[in-house]
Amino acid sequence: MKSPAPSQRQDQKSAETRRLLMEACISLLIAHGYSRLTTTDIAARAGISRGALTYHFASKEELVTASLEHQLRLVITEMREFVSASADQANASDAVIDYLWDLMAGGLYYATLEYLPELRHNPSFKAKMIPVVREFHGALDEVWATLARPEGIDPDRAQVILNATMCLIRGMVGQTIVRDDAAYFRELLDFWKSNLRTLLHQPAVSKPGAGPKTIEGGRP
């Protein structure tokens, strides 16, 4: 087998350097927060020189944006694999709740909590993050559509249930910061699983006078 060409080896080395820096960035973002995050600390954690870091990323913001995008794209890939594996699973809604909880409480939402304040005050950072966040939400929609489709659930109704579920999980993950109580959170998840089974098989109730949604009111 031929050895990789010098240019190919350089590309591989460059990709590995970027990967190490992005993984170190996410780890330190969760551990220290955005305001305390420094490129010096990131380089040290990754075992990369400061010069190499600045060669690949011109600023802290650029590195954080690339790192969050890298993290979300990995999560999106894993999420789609989960969808494929669980499409015909019995009690699929329970598996989805467990999966989403493990995903969000496993670090993803803690990272989100760190960069959200920066998005509020930094328009350029927000503009860079919005597209990949939308892609992540699209992957979430795929998870829910896979669960809802075999049950014949209206897509708009499924969307509301997904959003309510994600809001619950985000709130719970936020509460873990001040409450270390695994049994408490497990009880809440079990409660929601039970309610979700009912919601998924409950006919939707139309509001009096409600008609088809328009572009102005939401989805067509």
Image: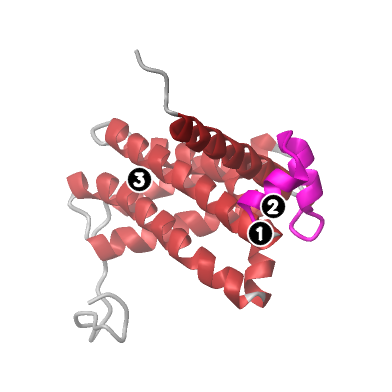
* Residue annotated with mark 1: 58
Residue 54, numbered circle: 2
Residue type at mark 3 is Arg
Residue type at mark 2 is Thr
Question: Tag 3's secondary structure?
Answer: helix
- Of badges 1 and 3, nearer the viewer stands 1
What secondary structure predominates along the stretch shown in magenta? helix
Please indicate, yes or no, whether residue 173 appears anywhere in the rendered image. Answer: no
* Residue annotated with mark 3: 197
- Of badges 3 and 2, nearer the viewer stands 2
Lateral position of residue 207 relative to residue 165, left or right: left
Which of disc 3 and disc 1 is earlier in sequence?
1
Q: Residue at x 31, y 33 (%)?
A: 86
Q: Quadrant of the C terminus?
A: bottom left
- Neighbour tally class for label 3: few under 14, some 14-19, many 20 plus, Cα within 10 Å: some
Q: Is residue 206 above or below residue 143?
A: below
In space, the residues marked 3 and 2 are separated at their CA atoms by 51 Å
What is the magenta range? 33-57
In space, the residues marked 1 and 2 are separated at their CA atoms by 5 Å
Mark 1 and mark 2 residues within 8 Å of each other at the beta carbon = yes
Q: Is residue 143 above or below residue 164?
A: above
